Amino acid sequence: MQEIQALNFQDFISADGDILITDSLRVAQVHKKRHDNVMQLIRKRVAEAGSWGLLNFKEAHYIDAQNSQQYEMFTMTKEGYQFLVGRMTGKKAVEHQIAYIEAFRAMAEYIRNQRDGLRYRCMEKELECLDSARRGSFHGRGLNMRKQEKPVLEAELAALLAQAQPSLLFN
């Protein structure tokens, strides 16, 4: 039995807040379909799905690197992807579907691990700051050490908190 190809999830899946998405360009690339045919299938599936389709597919645009023209594309959730490719048949289509679903799972796990690791480092740094403050209030030598440690610890904690809470970009 032939092994199913593995996708590098970071190339095909991205995060939009807490929602994992992909786009019609990537789907066309993986499934070796023309992008206009994928777009046509998406429009058909969105029309069939009604309001559910509008929640799982969003129109977007991209700039072609070769001619600098703007073209339409769709972004879609994992559920939208599964709904779209449910109509594609053949052995290769099934292999690509499985690879994409595994890529979605891997990306979700990757994001969860990043957040959990960052959360742990923030808590560890907060405890280090509290310990430094406790030692600083205990005796004179501790106070002198606290004066030296405080700016460094606070800067490190601020950097970790900035990573844990990314800023929102508004268009």
Image (cartoon, grey):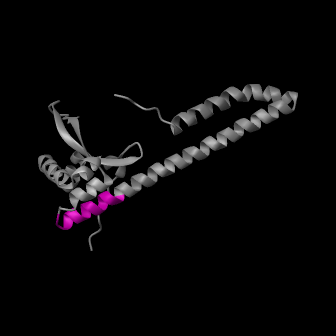
The quarter in which the C terminus is drawn is top left
Q: Position of residue 154 (x, y in %)?
A: 65, 30
Q: Main secondary structure of the magenta part?
A: helix
Q: Position of residue 51 (x, y in %)?
A: 25, 50
Can you say whether 87 is above or below 141 in the image?
A: below
Q: Position of residue 65 (x, y in %)?
A: 20, 34
Can you say whether 166 is above or below 25 in the image?
A: above
Can you say whether 92 is above or below 15 in the image?
A: below
Q: Judge by depth and name the residue closer to the eye, 148 or 170.
A: 170
The quarter in which the N terminus is drawn is bottom left
Can you say whether 8 is above or below 148 in the image?
A: below
Residue at 19%, 51% (x, y): give it: 46
Residue at 60%, 43% (x, y): give it: 121
Q: Position of residue 69 (x, y in %)?
A: 15, 31
Task: From the viewer's perspective, tell me whether residue 92 is left or right of residue 142.
Answer: left
Which residue is most to the bottom? 1
Residue at 16%, 49% (x, y): give it: 43
Extent of the magenta region: 89-102
Q: Judge by depth and name the residue closer to the eye, 54 or 126.
A: 54
Q: Is residue 39 visible?
A: yes
Residue at 73%, 37% (x, y): give it: 130
Q: Is residue 6 visible?
A: no
